[in-house]
Image (cartoon, rainbow, N blue to C red):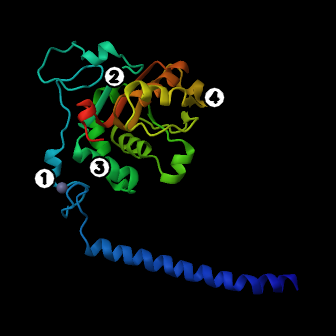
Amino acid sequence: MDAEIVQSRSFPARLRSAFGVIGGACRHAAKLALDIALPTLCVSCREPVEGEGVCAACWSKLSFIEPPYCPRLGIPFVYDPGTELLSMDAIANPPAYQRARAAVRYDEIARNLVHALKYHDRTDLAPAMGRWMARAGRELLDCADMLIPVPLHWRRAWHRRFNQSGALARAIERQSGVGLRGDVLRRVRPTEQQIGLSRPQRASNVQGAFEVSADMRGEIAGRRLVLIDDVLTSGATLDACARALLRAKVAQVDVLVFARVVDGPKAPI
Ligand SMILES: [Zn+2]
């Protein structure tokens, strides 16, 4: 009797779920048909593009960072002052991390790429962005033991469904062969968005926000790690991550990002 009731109750549910599957398949087929019918658009100028994210015209406008740059912070120099000279920033505000490198300057096209990846589920952009990052950070990756993506707080990760730093780190892992560990660093308290905050406000916003998982301490002690993030603005978030890792007796922390702000407050954040 109970079984009959269960069966009679579950029939509409089964029907709904069958329609759900059919509906899902139809939506999938419709999306597939659309993908075939509509070419991919450049994330920056919305012109049709073959293959990866940006069209040839926008790609040529991306401002790739090349030497000469500050050997510590990777800030580009306008002229070559010799290999050992540090930037004013590296002397005045030395961060906890050893070296930072970025693939591109944070300009409008870089921002479009970052926003598409971060807020519009364009995970298909990660392989190309990761490839440019692996190229920019080759000397860091050559002597690295692990890649550590900057973690999101679980609440933000839940809303956004994935961590953009993790997606970039996975692409770099494939390029470089350096293993990714997403479980080393945890964001133990949610932080305000850093946008619009001054440098000291940014530092205090992320102070104590990161922690190394207790069971990972043995695995990372004495290792050389590369922190991965999408954008470096003041470096406060990456500095807080590096401090947490160095407290756990890591030998060295370097930083590799997709884009870095070079012109300070004038950059279009
Ligand atoms: Zn374009």
Separation of residues labelled 1 and 4 (CA atoms): 48 Å
Q: Position of residue 61 (x, y in %)?
A: 14, 45
- The span from disc 1 to disc 3 (Cα, nearest Å) is 14 Å
Task: Please tell me how crowded label 1 is: few (under 14), some (14-19), or many (20+) other residues with Cα within 10 Å.
Answer: few
Q: Secondary structure at mark 3?
A: helix
User: In this figure, which residue is indicated by the disc labeled 4?
Assistant: 214
The answer to the question of whether label 4 and label 2 lie on touching residues, with beta carbons closer than 8 A, is no
**Foreground disc of the pair 1, 4:** 1
According to the picture, the residue beneath numbered tag 1 turns out to be 57
| Residue that mark 2 sits on | 99
From the viewer's side, name the closer residue of 263 and 124. 263
Q: Earlier in the sequence, mark 1 or mark 3?
A: 1
Q: Nearest to the eye among marks 3 and 4: give it.
A: 3
The answer to whether residue 219 is left or right of residue 108 is: right
At mark 1, the secondary structure is helix
Mark positioned earlier in the residue sequence (1 or 4): 1
**Residue at the location (40% across, 41% down)?**
169
Q: Secondary structure at mark 2?
A: loop
Q: Is mark 1 within 8 Å of ligand 1?
A: yes
Residue 13 x, y percent position in the rendering: 67, 81
Amino acid type, residue under disc 1 in the picture? Ala
Give the residue number, with chain letter if any, for mark 3: 113
Give the spatial CA distance, label 3 vs label 2: 24 Å
Q: Amino acid at mark 4?
A: Ala
**Could you tell me if the residues under marks 2 and 1 are in contact, i.e. CB atoms within 8 Å?**
no
